[in-house]
């Protein structure tokens, strides 16, 4: 059983970004900057970003924010990125982060879902 809005502790947004610019999917520094700037522009407090470049291609990373985290995994060969946004407290921050990410990634197609996180009743 999922938590109700009344006992929600956090908001978890799962994003599917298709046909993203290649630089964001291939270049570690470019991806890190885009996610850190998205968090900051949304009013989140960045604690620490950690990213890893895979060989031959692809990136994984997390931006730890005081409100929780933003995680990303890229598949450049498919022009695709999977992004999780998890925030505790005010759900508006998660929504703002999503908006900022979509601006920076400029995907041709976006799909996603929002899950309320917290203890079951």
Image: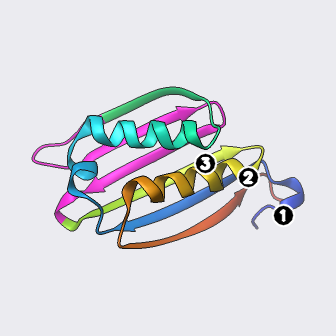
Which marked residue is nearer to the observer: mark 1 or mark 3?
Answer: 3
Residue 103 is situated, as x and y percent measured from the top left of the image, at 46, 57
The secondary element bearing badge 3 is classed as strand
- In terms of secondary structure, what is the magenta stretch mainly? strand
Residue at coordinates 66% horizontally, 36% vertically from top-left?
Answer: 67
User: Which residue is tagged 3?
Assistant: 86
The residue at which mark 1 appears reads as 4
Picture coordinates of residue 39, whole percent (x, y): 54, 40
Gap in angstroms between the C-alphas marked 1 and 3: 17 Å
> Does residue 106 lie above or below 37 as drawn?
below
Q: Are marks 2 and 3 in contact (CB under 8 Å)?
A: no
Quadrant the N terminus occupies: bottom right
Residue 115 position (above or below residue 87): below
Report the span colored magenta.
52-77
| Inter-mark Cα distance, 2 to 3 | 9 Å
Q: Please state which of residues 63 and 42 is positioned toward the viewer in this rendering.
A: 42
Q: How is the image coloured?
A: rainbow
Percent x, y for residue 48?
Answer: 48, 25
* 2 vs 3, front mark: 2
Viewer-proximal residue, 53 or 7? 53
The span from disc 2 to disc 1 (Cα, nearest Å) is 14 Å
Residue where numbered disc 2 is placed: 91
Quadrant location, the C terminus:
bottom right
Asked if the residues shown at circle 1 and circle 3 are in contact, with their CB atoms under 8 angstroms apart, the answer is no
**Residue located 81% across and 54% down the image:** 8
């Amino acid at each position: 059983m999922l938590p109700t809005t009344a006992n929600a502790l956090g908001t978890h947004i799962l994003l599917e970004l298709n046909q993203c610019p290649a630089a964001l999917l291939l270049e570690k520094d470019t991806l890190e900057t885009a996610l850190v700037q998205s968090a900051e522009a949304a009013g989140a407090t960045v604690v620490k970003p950690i990213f890893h470049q895979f060989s031959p291609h692809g990136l994984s990373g997390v931006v730890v924010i005081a409100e929780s985290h933003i995680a990303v995994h890229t598949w450049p060969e498919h022009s695709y990125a999977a992004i999780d946004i998890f925030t505790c407290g005010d759900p508006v921050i998660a929504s703002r982060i999503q908006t900022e990410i979509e601006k920076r990634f400029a995907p041709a197609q976006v799909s996603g879902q929002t899950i309320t996180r917290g203890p079951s009743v």
